[in-house]
Image (cartoon, rainbow, N blue to C red):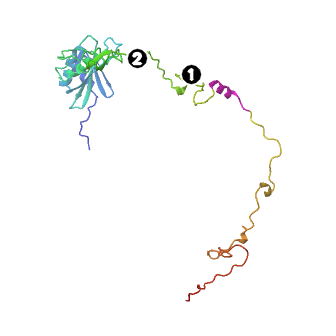
Amino acid sequence: MLSPAPRVASNEGVIEALRPALGSALLGAVEHVFEVTLTVERDHVVDVLRTLRDDFAYQQLMEIAGVDYPSRPERFEVVYHLLSLTKNHRIRVKVSTDEETPVPSVTGLWPVAGWLEREAYDMFGILFAGNPDLRRILTDYGFRGHPLRKDFPMSGYVEMRYSEEHKRVIYEPVKLAQDFRAFDFTSPWEGAEYVLPGDEKAVPQARGAQTPLSADQIAKAGTVTSTPAPPPVGDSKVTESPAQTGAGQPHPGNQPHEKPVQKDGAPAEPPGRADAPQTGEPVPPRTTDAPEGKNG
């Protein structure tokens, strides 16, 4: 059964079809990871996106993202992700800008771009000319800086907490008590070169398993080579008869000719009654007479 989703359109011929339509506004085009990326002039981004929407059926604006490259003269890239619902195909459009030059807003093409541009402004400080409500959207009121810039400190500039004294949330400068601590990530099991607090009272030990010996003593003991002992000189022990092995004589009553012989698989009868004492005297035969006073 075929999937109900439409087949993804191929990238073949997409760039060749877009070049004459975009003209000089197109600075570069590349196909990478099964997607086409267009780099266009910043001032012509609105016209390029309108052409892609109206003439090439990229109806939906999925995302506006920012990227920070501090080493570039224009450190920011604004990336527009478009989706064609009819062709099930995606395309990416990029423009470059700096901290002071605004990018034309595309809220006239897609109203949803208002919030997406606000997010790029809040996180990177990218300005958008023509956005009717360009203000922060994720950070708090009075936030300083833009968190997704590469030069923004990981700890930020202020910390927020609830004050029982003021009965509200207050902001204070960041206090990093750990800045003055020396962190050593060497595992003690690997043999740290320093002494942990309290270990100075213990007996010096070698690396690895617990041992009362010091490292110097273990090193010296490892250099001593033991000499194998010479073999003993003299006559070796050789037994010439069974009597010399220390084994005793067999029991006289455990001879093969004294054992009872069974016939036809029947159990052998012992030479005497089992309850008779072994005195060597003949055992009287059993009687089947009835007890006295009782007649059959």
Side of 246 where 144 appears, left or right: left
Q: Position of residue 50 (x, y in %)?
A: 19, 21
Q: Residue 200, labelled with which disc?
A: 1
Left or right: where 159 falls relative to 204 = left
Q: Position of residue 191 (x, y in %)?
A: 55, 25
Judged from this view, the residue extending furthest toward the bottom is 296
Name the foreground residue: 146 vs 165: 165
Report if residue 258 is visible in the image.
yes
Could you tell me residue 254's position as x and y percent?
Answer: 72, 67
Q: Nearer the viewer, residue 122 or 222?
A: 222
Q: Secondary structure at mark 2?
A: helix
Q: Residue at x 42, y 16 (%)?
A: 179
The residue lying toward the viewer, choosing from 291 and 232, is: 291
| Pointer 2 residue | 177
* Magenta extent: 214-226
Neighbourhood count class around disc 1 (C-alpha, 10 Å): few under 14, some 14–19, many 20 upward: few
Amino acid on which the number 1 mark rests in the picture: Glu
Give how far across and how far down residue 48 sits, in percent. 21, 19
Please report the residue visible at 26 percent of the width from the left and 28 percent of the height from the top. 90
Looking at the magenta stretch, what is its main secondary structure?
helix
Position of residue 174 in the picture relative to residue 289 (left or right): left
Residue count near mark 2 (Cα–Cα under 10 Å), binned few <14, some 14–19, many ≥20: few
Q: Is residue 227 magenta?
A: no
Marks 1/2: CA–CA distance:
27 Å
Residue 14, image quadrant: top left
